[in-house]
Amino acid sequence: MNQEQITKLELSIENMKNKKSRIYLIAQDTKGNAKASIAYIYRLGLALLNAGYNPIILHETPDYTGVSGWLGEEYMKLPHKSIEGQNLEVSPEDLIVIPELYGFVMSQITNLPCGKIVLCQAYDHILETLQPGQSWSDLGFLKCITTSDKQKEQVESIMRNVSFDILKPYISDEFKPQEYPAKPIISVHSREPRDTANLIKTFYIKFPQYRWITFRDVRGLTEKEFAKGLESSCLSVWIDETSGYGTFPLECMKSNVPVLGLVPNVVPEWMSENNGLWINNKTQMVDFIADYLQNWLEDNVNENLFIEMKKTVDSLPTKETFEKDSVSLFEKYISTRRESFEEQLSKLETIE
């Protein structure tokens, strides 16, 4: 029996040394719609693949749409596997990374022998699919990757006995400062489509003198289309109370487009009093839009706003930093797991 265990441990250790252990990354099917949380998972996977590791995107069903249509063809070179209808191989040396929203999947794989990691991008979703009183550590998930110090602080207060690592996302270089004067176009992003519709209808009713202003709903646009649209926008509007990091406003800032945003439940750490137009009451949003438009038309927007936006963007991780940090983090995970296996092997060999 000991010899069998020794052989298995030796194989697992060898696979980890040679970067052959699988790193499963579970991704939601967005049905072809752009979603920052899914882009994050794919960018993490591609960084690991390019460093010689063995990441695999896991999706729920075989009819998975993928991200090539909105994120880019390069991400489809990542191996993909469906949970449904396929015999999923999972070995002790493997890692599985599960988004916080998939509590029901965590419950189903509690007994798998692999390393288990939660990817938490939105604090508001951490309890959504867990049973009352159930925590990640109860299900064997003792590690968590999150995107900011603020999120770590919030999640850590609830999920005890879990170690946290912070891996901040980067903002794509598709987003660049405007080269030409902005047009009277307002780009809007909301988690709920009805919020966008209600905003536009309310604005046109309350301020009929501005019915010549164009609103652009950015939902459903590819990253390239969205970035291109920002080149002509004079303002962006952000309504997402459950946002965990706030990618949309940062993409707008990188494009030199001011943001009028509803402060989310967990205030992003990059948000400051001076780098955007932040409000706490959704019903006041149309009034702030009208005020901003008047200042914009009179060329009277406070220049300090643009200075603070640039400071915020300059403080963010670059693509190179994100990729380097991603690889370093998983090197640590695999190295720690390998050392644990080597300790077990040493004990068994002593007994043998």
Image (spheres, grey):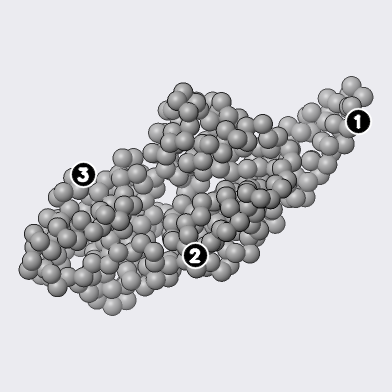
Rendering coords of residue 343 (x, y %): 78, 29
In primary-sequence order, the first of circles 3 and 1 is: 1
Left or right relative to 188: residue 330: right
In the rendered image, is residue 45 in sight?
yes
Secondary element at tag 3: loop
In primary-sequence order, the first of circles 2 and 3 is: 2
Left or right relative to 337: residue 204: left
Residue at the (57%, 33%) spot, across then down: 107
In the foreground, 75 or 198: 198
In the foreground, 241 or 50: 241
Residue at the (43%, 60%) spot, across then down: 34
Secondary element at tag 2: loop
Rendering coords of residue 329 (x, y %): 60, 45
Name which quarter of the figure residue 151 lies in: top left
How many angstroms separate mark 3 from mark 1 (CA)? 64 Å
Name which quarter of the figure residue 320 lies in: bottom right
Find disc 2 in the rendering and name its residue: 71
Residue at the (51%, 51%) spot, across then down: 28
